[in-house]
Every structure is written in structure tokens, then in C-alpha cells.
Image (cartoon, rainbow, N blue to C red):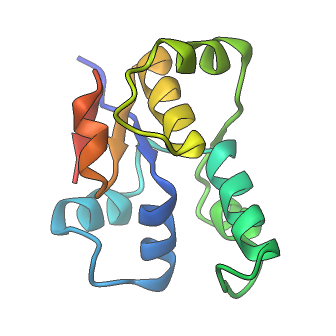
Amino acid sequence: MSRPLYLIDTHVLLWAVDDDPRLSEQQRTIMHHGEGLIISAVSIWEIAIKRALGKLTLAGNIVDTVRAHNIPFLAVNELHAARTEQLGDHHRDPFDRLLIAQAQIENLTILTSDAIFARYDVVVIG
């Protein structure tokens, strides 16, 4: 049996970088162990947009930070984009919808504290 692969939601990534206490103990353990972690290009895009709009302050370059921890990136492809059309309307956030689609297509477990993710056909660790 293969190990699960964990797609890290944007806020969990930011919490891990800041060692934020909102990170659950299970999320913290998985992140600390470091195996099977994946960051979507969607999260990098979301962070870039929020930084450009002044809605997020973050020291350093998030891409460099992720690379320093040897976490691979997951690119967005046409199957991920197309799957968003099939998702229910539980979540309106386009970044989160794309993460959910990626998790479904790639059979990934999502590390998130967003309870709405659990309404979709994905495995969530909150």
C-alpha cells in the first residue's frame, strides 16, 4: 500500500511557515515529517495575488521557502481546470475549488482547516 500524498491548502502552508498555533497537531506532525507533501501552483498564485493587493504580508519568497524544504509543486493542467465545472456549489473560492479538483484528479489528501472541503469527494485532514 502506498503512502498518502498531501496537498497543502494555502492557509496551512502560511501557518506552517509562521509556526502558527492554528495548525492542528495532525497537520503539524505531517508537515514536520515532510514526506508526501505537495504544494499546488494555485497556492503560489493565491499568495502572489494577496501580497500584490496588500492583503498578506510574508517575509521572503514563498517559492524559495518551499524549494528549501524540497516540497514538489503541482502544476495546474486542463483536467484540473475542467473538473471545477463538476464540483458542487459548496465553495465559491476559485483557488479552493481548483485545489479540490486537483485533489480529486490526483487522488490527494488535503491538509486544510476549511470545513467546506469535507463536503466534496476528497479526504481532508483538518
What residue is rendered at 21% in x and 68% in y?
Answer: 24
Residue 75 in view (yes/no): yes
Q: Point out the residue furthest to the left here.
A: 25
Q: Quadrant of the C terminus?
A: bottom left
Task: Out of 67 and 96, give the one closest to the viewer.
Answer: 96
Q: Which percent across, then down, holds residue 120? A: 29, 26
**Residue 89 placement: quadrant:** top left
Q: Is residue 76 above or below residue 52?
A: above
Query: Looking at the rendering, in which quadrant would you find the N terminus?
Result: top left
Q: Examine the rendered structure and indicate whether residue 37 appears above or below residue 82.
A: below
Q: Residue at x 59, y 63 (%)?
A: 69
Which residue occupies 64% across, 80% down? 56
Relative to 2, is 18 on the left or the right? right
Residue 85 position by quadrant: top right
Left or right: 35, with 29 as reference point: right
Q: Position of residue 99 (x, y in %)?
A: 51, 37
Q: Is any atom of residue 39 visible in this view?
A: no
Residue 27, horizontal then vertical, whole percent: 27, 60
Count the marks.
Answer: 0
- Can you say whether 63 is above or below 108 in the image? below
Which residue is at 69% across, 60% downward? 67
**Residue 36 at x, y percent in the picture:** 42, 41
